[in-house]
Image: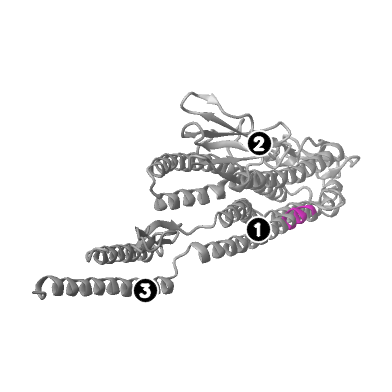
Amino acid sequence: MLSTFFGLEIARRALNAEQAATDVTGHNIANASAPGYSRQRADQVASDPYTIPSLGSPVMAQQVGTGVMVSQIERIRDSFLDGQYREQNSLQGQYQIISQTLNEVQTIFLDPSANGLNPVLDNFFNSWQELSKNAESMPIRTSLLGSAETLCATFNNISSQLKTAEDNLAATSPGPSPGTDLLVADVNKVNKIASQINDLNTQIIKIKGMGEQPNDLLDQRDNLLDQLSQLMNITVTQESNDGIKVTFGSANATLITTTASATVNTLSATATLSAGGALTISYHLYNPSNNITASGSISNTGGELTGIENAYENIISYQQNMDKLAKTLISAVNYLHAKNGLTLKVSAGGTITVGSAGGTFFTGSAAGNIQVNAQLLTYPNLVAAASAGATTSAIGSAGNALAMANLQNSAILNGATFDGYYQSIVTGIGSDTQRNSQLAANQQTLVDQVNNLRQSVSGVNMDEEMTNLMQYQHGYQAAARLVTVLDDMLDTLINKMG
């Protein structure tokens, strides 16, 4: 025969179970807007039954239910969707960096005013055309040299801005000291996040070892893994001690592990430019606790780190194209000026005659260092406007100036004119920008789709939580009513039986 108080124990367990479920629901509601939060559920199961020995049941003893208990506070999470999200998020980080960088680079090549390279280049050749009409005019020669200086300054400015864009991505050696570039910033982020994940690993392993479920710490760790996946393509492996191992790169280099003890390796990166302008970024890991190198050179990191490398290589190609344009212009103008042109000679008495062959018009060999010969700026009469073979008295001869003007329409750059070649550079940049912007937008759509699937599993649905809250409230009220009924029964037994 069971005790009269047995029913009170069942009611107590029911009250506790419904109270725990209500508390979990309240926790879900409170964190509905918290980034990375996974909804939780109080799993209720029947508690172990009470066995009543009975002579009337020789084969199996009678069992009476003892109520309910909360077996665990379960965290609702789908690890497969987490892996899918991080894989897509890594690609999004890569495409986004390339898209952002190319959009910034594209503004360098826009020609919204007369200061753009196209109109400045046209003005330079037009100045030669004007000189061909009045070759002995010093003001026209000075104007020509002014347009040449503007052209050089425009080349220099574009080259400088491209170099700044490169340095903002990754400061190279030889080059400016690293520290403020995006590569260093992202590597520092990786190390900071890895350290935080390692600390959480230690806490989670300890708490699980005591038989408890650290749901909120697991959420924090997964949220950090999501952030890390944007920076690099990571692989997350659950280890036997409930910690996680994080690897990345082509060689699956270990960033974090807990197999023997909580270990986090520190990532470093070195960007180097070869003499030919090729970029190499070398990644290494070392263990800060003993300063032992933990890996060789790592490549194919994925995420923003790969995006930085790809964007840098794009800028290098644009810089090389600009250098080719500037170098070809320097060579063509200098050839005509030095080999085919004659200067004006001004005597002490002011008499002007045709002088000797011209020297170099431009100095330098690339967009970054093209300059007008300083001697010409001091002595404009040294501009070689006349053609070789002109007589001494033919001071108005301007055959070479006309030849210079005709360079504008000469297809000497891969079958294109100077204007045409520059337009192909601008068009190529626009095409690259549009393509990568579309890739980034498409990838963002994929990330959002996978994240929506994750949220459908792990996210807090307020309608569902309110329904559960009502269910637990009624359950609690019913259990409380059971206590009242049992109290009345005990009152009858104790106080009303004579």
Q: Give the residue at x 33% y 72%.
A: 475
Instruction: Report the residue marked by disc 2.
Output: 251
Mark 2 belongs to which amino acid?
Answer: Ala
Quarter of the image for residue 40 reads bottom left
Q: Residues within 10 Å of mark 1 (few under 14, many from 20)?
A: some
Q: Identify the mark at residue 47; answer none if there is no mark.
A: none
Identify which residue, 362 or 213, lies in the foreground.
Answer: 213
Instruction: Confirm or deny contact between disc 3 and disc 2 (CB under 8 A).
Output: no
Quadrant position of the C terminus in the picture: bottom left
Q: Earlier in the sequence, mark 3 or mark 1?
A: 1
SS class, disc 3? helix
Which tag is nearer the camera, tag 3 or tag 2?
A: 3
Residue 372 x, y percent position in the rendering: 69, 40
Mark 3 belongs to which amino acid?
Answer: Gln
* Magenta region, residue range: 421-427
Q: Is residue 325 above or below residue 57?
A: above
Q: Earlier in the sequence, mark 3 or mark 2?
A: 2
